[in-house]
Image: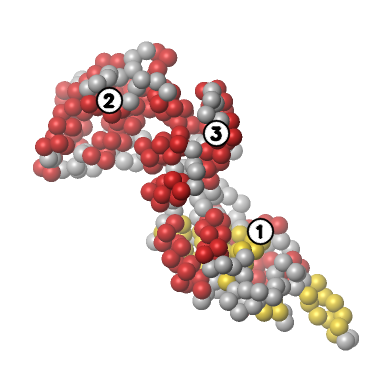
Amino acid sequence: MDLAVTVDQKQLMDVLLNVGMVRPVFIWGAPGIGKSAIVEQFAMELNLECVSLLGSQLAPEDIIGVPQIVDGRSVFCPPREIAREEPYCLFLDELNVCSHEVQKAFYSLILERRIGEYRLPEGSIVIGAGNRAQDSAITRPMSSALVNRMFHVELTANTRIWLEWAARSGIHRYVYDYLSMRPDHLWSQPPKTEEPFSTPRSWHMLSDAITSYGDNIGETELTVLANGCLTPAHAAQFIAYLRQVRSQFSLNRIMSGEAGWPNRPEERDILYFLAQSFRAQLLKELPPNRKNLTGSTAQMAMRAKSLLADLANISLEIAQVAVTPDDGSTLPAWFVIEAARDIPGLAGRKWGES
């Protein structure tokens, strides 16, 4: 499923509070993006128990139950986990991993909130969720009959909303501060190979692990933890950021002229991280059109070109990284042209124009 319109965490909650009250909703999204957590929060806000069933672990009899003979007739007895007296939120996670036989068992439950002669208590809610095929997750094609029984919505990660949640939820300051600087690292496309990748869930996991070790955690342990949770590139930059935090280097101090770029060979990872952060700052502050420069942004542009020259003297390759798009985003073309004019070799790598 690839929907034309996606929603963030707050928009999904609004959908659930409105559409979910009257129709079954299916939430699409990448692994670890927060689908289950939002459904649990939704049920909590309605004061409903959230009962989760994993589609990957279900057989048809887990839904329709097993037959018993009552007064000479067979009666299907639905499982206790589903057949409840009080209204509840039934969360069908990994629904698109079910076999087709299990999917058929869900037809009446999803559309009519009924299994045989049993009906879900009035006020019960049914929500499904699943990963997308493009995320290298285990999926099965959903029958058109099942697809057409639900309202579909696709969730994407929004770093601002996640950080608001993180501030209330005790996320470790290392993780919170890093993602405040590099919001683009909250989520990464799942890789084709078997290796960790960055998601809201994996950052939360990293936060818990760092908290468990305590404030005196060493760099070796931090490196192990980061590489066990994150995309390798994100893990490397996270460690470089922590080395910077624990040392005298600060991007703000460098940009204000109070400090210079680190230039020792053993500080190359810090230099690379600072160059990437420098690029992110320029993307945020510089206007796409030179005519829209203000006094402060014009001053920043001049300072940035000077800093790029200093950076090129230390490492032309890293200076090129600071202006070369590696994530689909590009610095304003006017700035790159002016910087390349002043710094020979800076535009030696291919870069795109905005």
Residue at the image position 27 percent from the left and 18 percent from the top = 260
Question: Are circles 3 and 1 on residues that touch, CB within 8 Å?
Answer: no
Q: Mark 3 points at which residue?
A: 210
> Which kind of residue does numbered mark 1 sit on?
Leu
> Which kind of residue does numbered mark 2 sit on?
Arg
* Alpha-carbon span between mark 2 and mark 3: 27 Å
320 lies left or right of 225? left
Residue 153 vs residue 35, the one in the foreground: 35
Q: Which of marks 3 and 1 is nearer the N terminus?
A: 1
Residue at the image position 61 percent from the left and 58 percent from the top = 94
**Residue count near mark 2 (Cα–Cα under 10 Å), binned few <14, some 14–19, many ≥20:** few
Local SS, label 1: strand
Residue at the image position 65 percent from the left and 67 percent from the top = 103
Q: Mark 1 points at which residue?
A: 54
Number of marks: 3
**x and y, in percent, of residue 156 in the image:** 44, 53
Q: Mark 2 points at which residue?
A: 253
Local SS, label 3: helix
Residue 184 placement: quadrant: top left
**Residue count near mark 3 (Cα–Cα under 10 Å), binned few <14, some 14–19, many ≥20:** many
Q: Which residue appears farthest toward the bottom when viewing the image?
A: 71
* Alpha-carbon span between mark 3 and mark 1: 30 Å
Q: Nearer the viewer, mark 3 or mark 1?
A: 3
Local SS, label 2: helix
Residue 319 vs residue 239, the one in the foreground: 239
Q: Can residue 314 be seen in this view?
A: yes
**x and y, in percent, of residue 267 in the image:** 40, 17
244 lies left or right of 36? left
**x and y, in percent, of residue 77 in the image:** 78, 75
Image quadrant occupied by the C terminus: top left
Residue 57 placement: quadrant: bottom right
Residue 304 vs residue 338, the one in the foreground: 304
